């Protein structure tokens, strides 16, 4: 394998290449534009385009594309020949994108959306194409994508963090959110995938009985990699490194055939682009290795789902990480102010954090095996909780368990142990110098959870900054605000086991929200509080918010509808005919046996036949019930109360079918069962 240093970033038009290829004054203009958004004249863009074109052609590229992230959650691209490449089409593109969801934000007479070059994320070459990361906006400037609000939220948190830091006497020029998204996924043989319509159409198995062995032994977690999986990971790493993605940790996860890739963290916007590239390449590279990469949050029922833990922190250009407790967190004003800002933000905007991870697919995972519940809470760990409690009580020392110590001696090592190792059940955990948001689903774009975190934290920082700037003693004012924020919002802190029923009851007592499904949380998108949050910081307009709410809800309903139709198709075309074949064989066997013996034997054959016929009858009825609701599909709008009823009944009827189908699977001889089983897919022998 090529050395990482040789290939890393070799296909990226990064800072080093730019410095090399661009005239000094042009590079200066671009650098300034990236730093402060100053204008980039077309003449300068022309020079950049020409240099990029030369570089890309030398690397074998023949085409270029504006690469954007419409609200579907996946990326989109439209390739053009590099022959036509100039400053004009570097800066702006006009994809014929009328069928991307916009929920009315693009008037029909102006169906086009525009893509605008995002200079903060470097261009790269994939296969024969130069990729230009872009934001996707309407003629009127409405954000039609997932990147634009992320960029706006980066700016909001930068501005508000700097205001707070500057009032505290810190000289900081830029604060950037940092993200490290750990990506989980499953790999199964392509040949088996091809035989499962549910995986093909919905990304998850809609039926499937538990195999005799599952994940109870935990023998897969961090276990030895099978050679075929190892080869896949090596190939994937190489592809990612070429594109500048710092893929770093690759290991087996808890469930059989489940794995994880964690990159080294980077600036939010770039981490988000890189995660999209990672997901895409995972699928492509798997294909080359005869495998299918499943990115769905819950491909297999009863077995751990896949998440995308988002590690999030705020870093200043000076190297300061505002969440680093330091040797004396109790007297670390920056730490206390930012920590309490997050605590307040998470409590106040629980609904938005829940919405940021809401999808039909993630609903199956949240609250299931090893995944955090749908209730948002923060894990601080014993030591930091003790620090915060001491801070609230106005004490100058911290008592940690039976140790009384003044902060500074050996505490940091304890923080690490406490905060990173002990609680894997928390949806939002402080892990020593960052927060780890664990509710995010594996398929979800990083963008939405990231811009929620940035925006809600920015809004509390803004409150703090407004008061601090108006006060004579900014530091004392900050301490008062932080104390008050902690007192009022510490109900969101929970260090215990999030998987227990006691926690669900306790959370209810504390008044915390528990939105189990997308349709429960979705109306909150546009509550007065949340509209105020986004509009006051300029991250999303009310129109953009409402559009996102509609699109997400519609997507949710459509996904459920596709699942229902797929399940009906499998039931009617695969399962019932297979059981019928088996029953016919049973009946023929009984007939042949009776003929052979010359008498009517009653016994196992007949009982078995009767039992199979009765279960099939139940299956048929359950399918009829589901068909009835899918036949009557309402308008998929959040405003239509029937839509929620539709979603809830589809979920219930699908569960009924699944229970019956799984019972049939257990009872049927393997040779009659028409689709690959969980055992075959999860313990594929191809990889030995
Ligand atoms: P674990 O599985 O214990 O959570 P991993 O090593 O799998 O740990 O992933 C940790 C992730 O957190 C990596 O992507 C890493 O780069 C990221 N990370 C580390 N420090 C920070 C930080 N200060 N800000 C954001 N992300 C961080
Ligand atoms: Mg993690």
Image (spheres, helix red, strand yellow):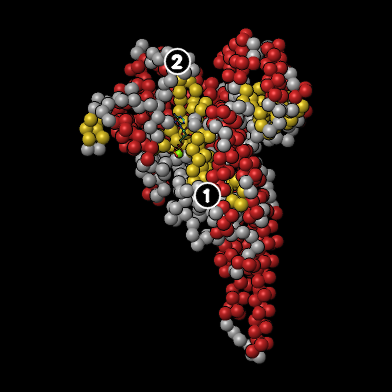
Q: Tell me the residue that label 2 is attached to.
A: 172
Question: In this view of the protein, which residue sits in the foreground, 79 or 550?
Answer: 79
Residue under the image location 66 percent in, 49 percent down: 201
Q: Quick check: can you spot residue 459?
A: no
In the picture, the disc for residue 396 is none
Q: Residues within 10 Å of mark 1 (few under 14, many from 20)?
A: few
User: In x, y percent, where is residue 669?
Assistant: 60, 69
Residue under the image location 39 percent in, 49 percent down: 500
Depicted 654 relative to depicted 462: above or below: below
Quadrant assignment for the C terminus: bottom right
In the picture, the disc for residue 226 is 1
Depth-wise, is mark 1 or mark 2 nearer the camera? Answer: 1
User: In x, y percent, where is residue 179?
Assistant: 50, 30
First in sequence, mark 1 or 2: give its number: 2
Depicted 681 relative to depicted 497: above or below: below
- Left or right position of 64 against 389: right
The quadrant of the rendered image in which ligand 1 is seen is top left
Residue under the image location 64 percent in, 41 percent down: 284
In three-dimensional space, the C-alpha distance between marks 1 and 2, rounded to whole angstroms, equals: 48 Å
Residue 136 location, quadrant: top right
């Amino acid at each position: 394998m090529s050395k990482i240093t040789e290939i890393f970033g070799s296909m990226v038009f990064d800072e080093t290449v730019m410095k090399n290829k661009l005239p000094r004054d042009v590079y200066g203009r671009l650098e300034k534009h990236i730093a402060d958004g100053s204008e980039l004249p077309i003449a300068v863009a022309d020079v950049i385009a020409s240099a990029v074109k030369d570089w890309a052609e030398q690397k074998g590229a023949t085409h270029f594309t504006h690469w954007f992230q419409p609200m579907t959650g996946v990326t989109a691209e439209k390739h053009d020949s590099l022959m036509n490449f100039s400053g004009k089409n570097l800066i702006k593109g006009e994809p014929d994108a009328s069928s991307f969801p916009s929920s009315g934000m693009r008037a029909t007479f102006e169906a086009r959306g525009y893509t605008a070059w995002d200079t903060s994320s470097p261009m790269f070459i994939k296969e024969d194409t130069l990729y230009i990361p872009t934001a996707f906006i309407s003629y009127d400037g409405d954000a039609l994508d997932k990147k634009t609000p992320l960029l706006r939220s980066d700016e909001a948190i930068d501005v508000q963090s700097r205001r707070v830091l500057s009032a505290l006497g810190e000289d900081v020029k830029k604060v950037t959110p940092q993200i490290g998204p750990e990506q989980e996924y499953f790999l199964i043989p392509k040949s088996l995938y091809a035989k499962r319509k549910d995986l093909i159409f919905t990304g998850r198995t809609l039926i499937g009985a538990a195999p005799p062995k599952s994940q109870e032994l935990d023998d897969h977690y961090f276990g030895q990699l099978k050679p075929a999986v190892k080869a896949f990971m090596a190939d994937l790493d190489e592809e990612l490194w070429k594109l500048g993605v710092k893929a770093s940790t690759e290991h087996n996860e808890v469930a059989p055939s489940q794995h994880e890739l964690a990159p080294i963290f980077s600036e939010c916007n770039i981490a988000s682009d890189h995660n999209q590239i990672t997901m895409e390449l995972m699928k492509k590279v798997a294909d080359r290795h005869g495998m299918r990469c499943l990115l769905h949050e819950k491909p297999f029922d009863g077995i751990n789902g896949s998440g995308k833990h988002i590690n999030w922190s705020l870093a200043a250009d000076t190297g300061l990480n505002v969440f680093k407790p330091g040797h004396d967190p109790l007297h670390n004003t920056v730490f206390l102010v930012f920590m309490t800002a997050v605590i307040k933000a998470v409590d106040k905007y629980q609904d938005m954090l829940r919405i940021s991870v809401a999808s039909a697919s993630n609903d199956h995972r949240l609250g299931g095996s090893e995944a955090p519940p749908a209730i948002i809470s923060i894990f601080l760990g014993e030591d930091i909780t003790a620090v915060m409690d001491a801070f609230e009580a106005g004490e100058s020392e911290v008592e940690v368990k039976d140790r009384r110590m003044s902060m500074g001696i050996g505490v940091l090592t304890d923080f690490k142990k406490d905060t990173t190792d002990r609680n894997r059940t928390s949806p939002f955990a402080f892990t020593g110098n960052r927060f780890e948001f664990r509710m995010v689903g594996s398929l979800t774009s990083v963008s939405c959870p990231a811009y929620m975190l940035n925006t809600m934290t920015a809004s509390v920082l803004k409150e703090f900054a407004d008061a601090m700037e108006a006060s004579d003693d900014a530091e004392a004012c900050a301490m008062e605000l932080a104390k008050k924020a902690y007192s009022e919002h510490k109900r969101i802190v929970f260090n215990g086991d999030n998987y227990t029923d006691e926690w669900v009851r306790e959370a209810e007592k504390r008044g915390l929200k528990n939105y189990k499904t997308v349709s429960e949380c979705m109306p909150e998108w546009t509550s007065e509080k949340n509209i105020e949050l986004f509009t006051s910081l300029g991250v999303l307009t009310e129109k953009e918010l409402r559009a996102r709410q509609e699109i997400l809800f519609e997507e949710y309903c459509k996904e459920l509808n596709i699942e229902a139709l797929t399940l009906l198709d499998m039931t009617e075309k695969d399962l019932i005919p297979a059981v019928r074949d088996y029953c016919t064989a049973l009946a023929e066997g009984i007939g042949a046996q009776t003929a052979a013996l010359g008498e009517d034997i009653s016994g196992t054959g007949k009982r078995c036949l009767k039992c199979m016929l009765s279960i099939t009858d139940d299956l048929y009825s359950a399918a009829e019930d589901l068909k009835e609701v899918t036949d009557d599909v309402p308008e998929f709008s959040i405003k239509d109360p029937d839509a929620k009823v539709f979603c809830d009944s589809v979920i219930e009827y699908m569960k009924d079918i699944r229970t019956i189908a799984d019972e049939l699977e257990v009872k049927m001889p393997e040779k009659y069962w028409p689709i690959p089983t969980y055992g075959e897919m999860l313990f594929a022998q191809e990889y030995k």
